[in-house]
Image (tube, rainbow, N blue to C red):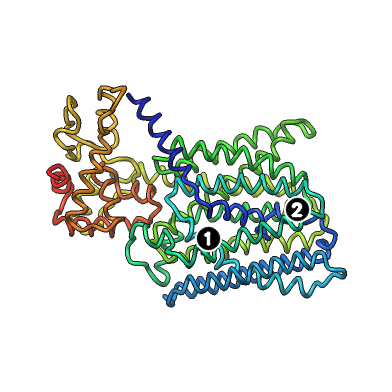
Amino acid sequence: MANVEKDRAAAGAFTRLAELRPRHGALCAFATTLLSCMPVIVVLGGVPRYAALGDSFLLCLLLAAVASGAFLCARALRGAPRDGNRLARGAVVAYLAAALAFIVLLVAPDPWPLGAAGAGLVAGGALPAVLCAWARAVAAPMDRSLALCALVGGGAALAGWILALLPLLLLLPAFCVLVVAGTVPLLLIESEDSPDEADAPQAAPVACGKGALGRLLSVTWLPLLGLAAYVFMTGLVAHGAFGTMPATYLGSLPEAALVLLVCARWGRRPLLPWCYRVLVPLLAAVFVVLGAFPAGTFPQEASVTVLYGFYLVLAMIGCALFLAVTHSREVAPELTCSFATAVTAAAALLAQVLSAAMPGSDFSSWLPVVTGLFVAVLLLFLGRTAWDGLVTPQGGALGAEGAAGGEGVSAGCAPASAADGARVPARVADGVPAPKAVGAAGFEAVAAASPATPTAPEPSLRDTLEARCAEVSAARSLSPREAEVLVYLARGFTPAYIAKSLVLSISTVRTHVRNIYRKLNVNKREELLHLIDEG
């Protein structure tokens, strides 16, 4: 029965991941032609005028992106009125015009560095708002966001590979078509009700000032560090390291497939901690082993591709997390996207300055150093998390929160103990006795004991519990996000686990739990579970 449940879960995951829309294809076109990315730099590097215009264009683009991102971030922190649709339309038009103008300059009879710099300033100034518009248009929970990033990354790598094979006469027209396909749909998407505006679960009231930035950093600092490392190192590699194009494509496609497999197989658990505890260390270990082989051998050369895949996975996780944070709406999407854009553009700008200051240098020796630094930070973070889990009491945390207004929150991320007195409805399925206690382990143990029916399987315990929670949520007028948190509480999970699963800060989860207890008029866990039991 356990294997059947796993197969059903995997099939359901693939079904969810397959829910693609035309806008996702447009996003792939946008990623393929994002002017500050390494594959685009390398593809356009073969154009004769790029050597004279490319550096000034990129430098101005990144400077403007940092300044624009910082301005929008400060504006969001001040709580300025939001005019996302109007700003997005203007930014899309400006970015499209600047990108096409730069392509025209590449084929002009005479080089015009000043014009390239102006196009870079316009494109960079519009880039944060364009990225925010895309984030709002495709935001989703963490598992779907990571799968989307894998699909977009793999598709962009494949499209870039095809572009690199085209002759110059076809390369620039095809590139212009992709630029238009990756930006114009945003004008249509933003004219509709964005799906994350209408359907996203409601979060706690959006915080302003330093509180909002603190919440954002508490959830995103490690993925943002990985994303910045990816942008920095690929920026250096694009300016003359080694084997850039083969490593880009050979590393992108297998890693995208690997991330898709991870989303389908382990998407139901908190995906972000799992990636940093298993996937990222595994890729780093493979790079260390292959890099230890003698120079010139196939394993040592393959380590370059593995290393690019390592950084690409970091980038996918970082982008997916920011999409998930945008979906959760814990902080304003403008703050989330502008802050991420400013930080990553600053990392790319640093790479651009270093490559200009040391022309002709081989930065390949920097790759293992930066990789080692990131892995060291990751190990320190995981070690501290493990230590906090050892020294922090697990039991009774949720009941204390309900009684004391949210002050006693466990730092653990495992389901609460069965000894806490949680119960499951008395008759969940025919012939299956109700357990005395519940948590994730309790539910799965009963599910494993359930008789498997080959034709029409009865509703699983999770489905039954979610149905009961939905009835209670509708009867007590819980918000969509509170209803989502209620399911986790009923399954016996701690607030820390809920925060990791829903990509929220602990303080936001505490707020939701306090609101749930208040609306349900209960003071402790036993009363909450008794209310769900009665339906």
In this image, 481 relative to 382: left or right? Answer: left
Task: Please report contact status of discs 1 and 2: CB closer than 8 Å, yes or no.
Answer: no
Q: Say which residue appears at 44% left-offset and 39% top-offset.
A: 15
Dot 1 crowding, Cα within 10 Å, few <14, some 14–19, many 20+: many
Identify the residue at horizontal 39%, vertical 71% (top origin): 208
Residue at horizontal 25 percent and vertical 30 percent from the top: 458
Count the numbered circles shown: 2
Instruction: Classify residue 4 by image quadrant.
Output: top left
Of the pair 11 and 114, the residue shown nearer to us: 11
Q: Spatial distance from mark 1 to mark 2, Cα to Cα?
A: 24 Å
Q: Which amino acid is tagged 1?
A: Trp
Give the left or right position of residue 155, taking residue 469 as reference: right
- Relative to 12, is 481 above or below? below
Amino acid type of the residue that numbered disc 2 sits on in the rendered structure: Val
Helix, strand or loop at mark 1 = helix
| Left-right relation of 431 to 305 | left
Q: Which residue is mark 1?
A: 134
Instruction: Using the image, tell me which numbered label, if any, was put on residue 42.
Output: 2
Image location of residue 73, percent across then percent down: 50, 70
Closest to the observer: 265 or 442? 265
Q: What secondary structure is found at the residue carrying circle 2?
A: helix
